[in-house]
Amino acid sequence: MAVVTLPTQDEERRLRAAGFPRVAGVDEAGRGPLAGPVVAGAVVLPDLTASAAAELLLIRDSKMLSASQRRRAAALIHSLTDDIGIGVASVDEIDEHGIAPATKLAMRRALSGLRLPPDHLLVDAVRLDWNRLPCLALVRGDSLCTAIAAASIVAKVHRDALMDELDAVHPGYGFARHKGYAAPSHLEALARLGPSPAHRRSFAPLRLALPHADA
């Protein structure tokens, strides 16, 4: 059986000891889909060393969790801290600026939504300039750092809820099932129905395979 390596608060504790008491973890959900917004989360966690919460093991890379586990983990994160920010960049902003700048825009909005400003940022693989704060970009940060993992979970749960709403507004594409990713059923619906207003027309599958997308 594969051994699962859980994220830790080692980086957060190191930064607190170095004089940065409020460390925010930041991550996104939805860079790759063909439809829907990109969503970022920012989370400032307390030191969880003394926590007796049995479900702390759920605070890990959101991609390793089922939808129901992510919802449970998000509820746990909200119970542990009231300092959570969510930021969204729209499909129009993705198409206008590109996915990387739009992702950073969502991250800045998430940080602006925190109750109190942080002193240092821990971001999953992205060097983020926000309020001139020091920032450490960690590759695979959601697997290594608890605060980043928590941010990935709250971002994913929020985005999934938005995609459920888009499924009701634009029926027929299956957004509630595949959340806008390039699933075969999604590509088939695109070929049959054409793009909806929720689709990212700048993304190659629409820009190249569906030349009528810009009509």
Image (cartoon, helix red, strand yellow):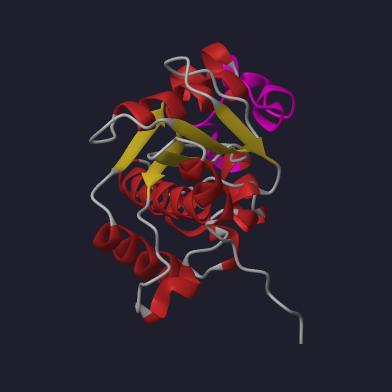
Q: From the viewer's perspective, is 141 left or right of 17? A: right
Q: Given the current orientation, which residue lies at the most extreme bottom position?
A: 1
Q: Is residue 91 left or right of residue 34?
A: left
* Quadrant showing the C terminus: top right
Residue 196 is covered by the magenta coloring: yes
**Which quadrant of the rendered structure holds the N terminus?**
bottom right
* In this view, 199 is above or below 149: above
Q: Is residue 29 visible?
A: no
- Tell which of 152 and 172 is nearer to you: 152
- Residue located 31% across and 47% down the image: 165
Nearer the observer, 106 or 83 = 83
The one nearer the camera, 150 or 154, is 150
- 53 w.r.t. 178: above or below: below
Horizontal relation, residue 128 to residue 203: left or right:
left
Residue found 53% across the figure and 18% down from its top: 129
Q: Magenta residues, as a range?
A: 192-215
Measured from the top left, where is residue 92 in percent x and y?
Answer: 45, 19
Vertical side of 88 occupied by 84: above or below: below
The answer to whether residue 73 shows anywhere in this view is yes
The answer to whether 34 appears left or right of 115 in the picture is: right
Q: Position of residue 6 (x, y in %)?
A: 61, 68
Is 89 colored magenta in this rendering?
A: no
The answer to which image quadrant residue 176 occupies is: bottom left
Query: Which one is in front, 89 or 105?
Result: 105
Rendered position, 97 above or below 136:
above
Tally of marks: 0
Q: Residue at x 39, y 40 (%)?
A: 21
Residue 206: % across, % down: 65, 28
Determine the image quadrant of residue 99. top right
